[in-house]
Image: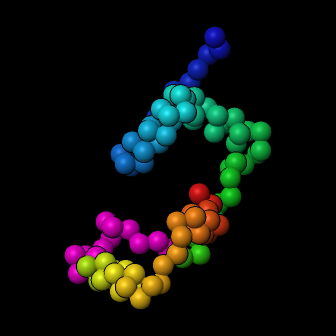
Amino acid sequence: MSRTANIFARVEPEVKEQAEKVLDQLGIPMSNAIGLFLRQVVLRRGIPFDLKLPQNKPLSLGTLSEEQFNAEIEKGLAELTAGQVVSADSVADRIQRDYGI
């Protein structure tokens, strides 16, 4: 086995937890995923994915006050009542297009 070096990084606990869940499903330890990322950085001589700002900033529950949250829920209910609905597939396509995820 080749020698290894330690990397210490600070990340938000929620991001770490979400990443661990995905990596567990893939059967890849976190350290291997980080190693894969770093190998791609070396091979591509840069970040191995596009870095760009999203076209529209999505709402984040943690940034909304109770009043803002309730207003968004009311807005959604009004759109639903008015028949202004879209399919889940079209939403997924838009998210992938706008945010690259």
Q: Report whether 95 appears left or right of 15.
A: right
Q: Quarter holding the C terminus? A: bottom right
Q: Position of residue 63 (x, y in %)?
A: 33, 70
- Residue depicted at 49% across the width and 40% down the height: 22
Above or below, 84 relative to 31: below
Q: Is residue 68 visible?
A: no
Foreground of the two, 75 or 2: 75
Residue at image coords 65%, 14%:
2
Q: In this view, does 2 lie above or below 20?
A: above
Query: Is residue 48 shown to the viewer in this render?
Result: yes
Residue at image coords 63%, 39%:
37
Left or right of 31, for residue 77: left
Question: What residue do we see at 44% from left, 38% from top?
Answer: 21
Q: Where is residue 88 in the image (x, y as percent from the top left)?
A: 52, 66
Q: Find residue 35 and report its horizontal and vertical position in percent.
A: 61, 32
**According to the image, what is the colour scheme of the structure?**
rainbow
Q: Which residue lies furthest to the top in this view?
A: 1
For residue 59, side relative to residue 29 (left or right): left
Between 59 and 1, the residue placed more toward the observer is: 59
Q: Identify the image quadrant of the N terminus.
A: top right
In this view, which residue lies farthest toward the left?
Answer: 66
Q: What stretch is highlighted in magenta?
A: 57-69
